[in-house]
Image: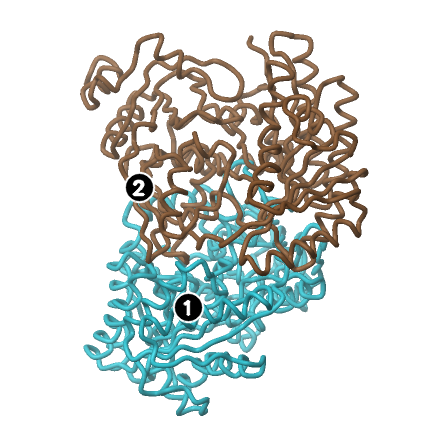
Chain colours: A brown, B cyan
Amino acid sequence: MSRNWQEAVKEVIDESRVLTDISDLYSYSFDASFGTFVPEAVIQVKAREEVVSVVKIANEYKVPVYPRGQATSLSGGSLPVHGGMVLDVTLWTDTLEVYHDDLVVVASPGVLTADINQAAEEHGLFYPPDPSSAHVSTIAGNLAENSGGPRGLKYGVTKDYVIGLEVVTPEGKVMNTGGRTIKNVTGYDLTKLIVGSEGTLGIITKVTLKLLPKPQATKTMMAVFDDIAEAGAAISQTLTSGILPSKMELMDQNCAISVENFQPFGLPTDAEAIILIELDGHPDVLEKEIQSVDEIVRGVGARYTVLAETNKEAANLWKARKMVSPAIAAVKPTKVSEDATVPRSKIPEMIHRLNDIKEKYEIELVVFGHAGDGNLHPNIMCDKRDQEEMMRVEEAVGEIFQAAIELGGTLSGEHGIGTLKAPFMEDEVGELGIEMLKKIKDSWDPNNIMNPGKIFAEPGQKLVLRDE
Amino acid sequence: MSRNWQEAVKEVIDESRVLTDISDLYSYSFDASFGTFVPEAVIQVKAREEVVSVVKIANEYKVPVYPRGQATSLSGGSLPVHGGMVLDVTLWTDTLEVYHDDLVVVASPGVLTADINQAAEEHGLFYPPDPSSAHVSTIAGNLAENSGGPRGLKYGVTKDYVIGLEVVTPEGKVMNTGGRTIKNVTGYDLTKLIVGSEGTLGIITKVTLKLLPKPQATKTMMAVFDDIAEAGAAISQTLTSGILPSKMELMDQNCAISVENFQPFGLPTDAEAIILIELDGHPDVLEKEIQSVDEIVRGVGARYTVLAETNKEAANLWKARKMVSPAIAAVKPTKVSEDATVPRSKIPEMIHRLNDIKEKYEIELVVFGHAGDGNLHPNIMCDKRDQEEMMRVEEAVGEIFQAAIELGGTLSGEHGIGTLKAPFMEDEVGELGIEMLKKIKDSWDPNNIMNPGKIFAEPGQKLVLRDE
């Protein structure tokens, strides 16, 4: 037995890929959420056997293992909160194979999500999940957090496309789940258990995803509402008209103002809500369907609508939507991005509650997001150096979660629980829910080495957005 | 403490719904698969609190609990193989509510799947999973086995539509999983773990399902092939052309012959394969898409195609497909229905292997099924009173499973493992796979009272289709 786990790791992994310099460790100490936690070593794994060796060492020495992709997590999924080792999969991109006839793609964990989609498109296929980080995030990270995106409305989320996994268990064994078939009811669905488990049940070393035929065309429109309740009605009535849009994105007034201040797109800044709608499918039918949607949204009271006549016009509308994040990031240095999700019918009420919370805590809050599936993104603009402001923000975030749960919704639609939302888990799933989750975790990972500190709150843990 | 568990049950459940007469018990001793197992009591539960009370008694007395819907299981999911108590949910139909604005429906476990679809259609919505038993099977049974159906190709299976559950755990506690939102990444996905777990992890007492806008129209065509490999190519090429049919059903030659002998529909009996294709969506685009599909299937060598001009013609083609089961049931008294599933590209090879198995064991075998998603239904026609024949059938079934696994497929696409396929589980998921499944099972159900004898094989268990 080696003197310590770091030495043991260096015996099985090329030393050039075992980082222990303090400057390297610092660059792995944060993600896109909050907090700084310095790991003891970073291991840049590139093969299944390497993961097996390293996890066996971790399990033997009882060292925390923190799997990490591009660390775009908004909930702290990849933060090494208890030190130990980070397993960086970003160099592991050797496999990216489309099996055209089976409509599946097989990829290494470090492959970027956008690269998977590009490979699929070369075969006339597509991979629907479209988190806004797709161009920089790894597929394994997307799986860990079960990423969503605007297309979730029509096409579902990451989990709906994962049909097979190769996973290294917390005890360092290689397990294959699912396979290459769309239908599979052989035992419990370990594939869907592992997707979204945020790296707490094993390390994903290979993924098999199902693909769909790529839609032939898309069509975009914008609808402008003076009353947010009418925007909610427009969403419901469209969705029950027999038309299923590929995207239905909402921006509130504060959001439109921020974008227009940042870069003018011609968004109305005096309307209570703007909805961007995209339809996809056969070009002939899109023309008719977009007219039907236009009638519906005008019928419930839209002030006006804009139908993109060209791809360029459509792209411009979507660019305005994409500018929301940079626009609000420019307002103040810190952005707290939430993803509280409610049943679709509760969207107007949720937005009213968010406005109440904004006023109560005197915070700067904008609301945008995937309204078609109830997945809102309330974003708070603040300054994390201002301790007093951040305490108000912390309380406001707690109330946002409470409001979502009270309206029959959930803490998180697509960002995951990570460290940030762990203190609120019990409010949603109850004591029994936590107990049943923990039973699974404990049975698979008795030494609690896999991404410890995530999903399950430590005793007394509270939301902290300040550096302490 | 009561003298025995039967007495304890009668203290909490109205005696009229606790059946212990031997004639009653016999009617609960079988399902649509093989074997006869008489339970010690049947309890017709109608409320969550009843299930809580009964499960607590079962856990205290360590008595097996066998949840049961309409017992249409083809894998033995509802068989009370170790006696104990059957929990019959068929009387429990009080809740069936469509929440139109949220696009969800909430139902009691005993509601028939077809009734859910009818309720949804009254709101312009639909519930896509369409197992052929939908008119007689309960939604809880569909969830337990994660039922599929022809529309799985485009719309996925039962699991893809379950977003929330109320479940009584093996220790008699009420747990809520998921909710009413489409997106939810709060902790491990217990909803999708429980769906397809065949009643081994708890009793489902309420289900929340997501609905979709109902497609406006459908269009059907039949394509006839002299070479099964061409039929496989037709499926692949259609699916990569940008068109996603709602159904792609295959019938082999033996199948067509059986149907025509049973009731003439004008199916060609000299062709190696027939594919029935249904498209759904906007009526204008269907007309164009069906022409595109027609060109594709002719391009790969279809002998001829038939495009249904009217709904009546379409219904007639689908009726021929629906007649397959009764037609082959009329050939011989016993029908062994399998659902081995392979990656789409392996369909022609799987069909050739099935024909080899048919010849090797001199059995009567037809192949039909959901070819678009690789989910074939090899059916063997036999006579279970003929012990010698049934032994050949048992060996043939084992080889069918082996062939599916060798081709990268699975034992079961939509029927579940139950008792029948339990002996083959390890061949597919490996020793480690079984171990990881068992860890979950043991952690939730330490006394192994929930549907014991399913999924996990008993030591030395073999496939037995004969009454022993």
Q: Are marks 2 and 1 in contact (CB under 8 Å)?
A: no
Q: Secondary structure at mark 2?
A: strand
Instruction: Classify B139 as above or below B274.
Output: above
Identity of the amino acid at label 1?
A: His
Identity of the amino acid at label 2?
A: Leu
Instruction: Classify A343 as above or below B403.
Output: above
Q: Secondary structure at mark 1?
A: strand
Residue A118 x/y as whole percent = 39, 42
Say the numbered circle drawn on residue B160: none
Instruction: Please state, as top left, top right, bottom left or bottom right, where the C terminus of chain A lies in the image.
Output: top right
Residue B177 x/y as whole percent = 58, 44
Q: Residues within 10 Å of mark 2 (few under 14, many from 20)?
A: many
Question: Residue at position x 28%, y 33% from top?
Answer: A172
Residue A293 x/y as whole percent = 69, 53
Question: Residue at position x 27%, y 67% from top?
Answer: B350
| Distance from Cα at disc 2 to Cα at disc 1 | 28 Å
Give the chain of mark 1: B
Instruction: Classify A60 as above or below B173.
Output: above
The verdict on a common chain for dots 2 and 1 is no
Q: A261 and A41: which one is in front?
A: A261
- Residue B347 seen anywhere in this rendered image of the structure: yes
Q: Which residue is mark 1?
A: B370
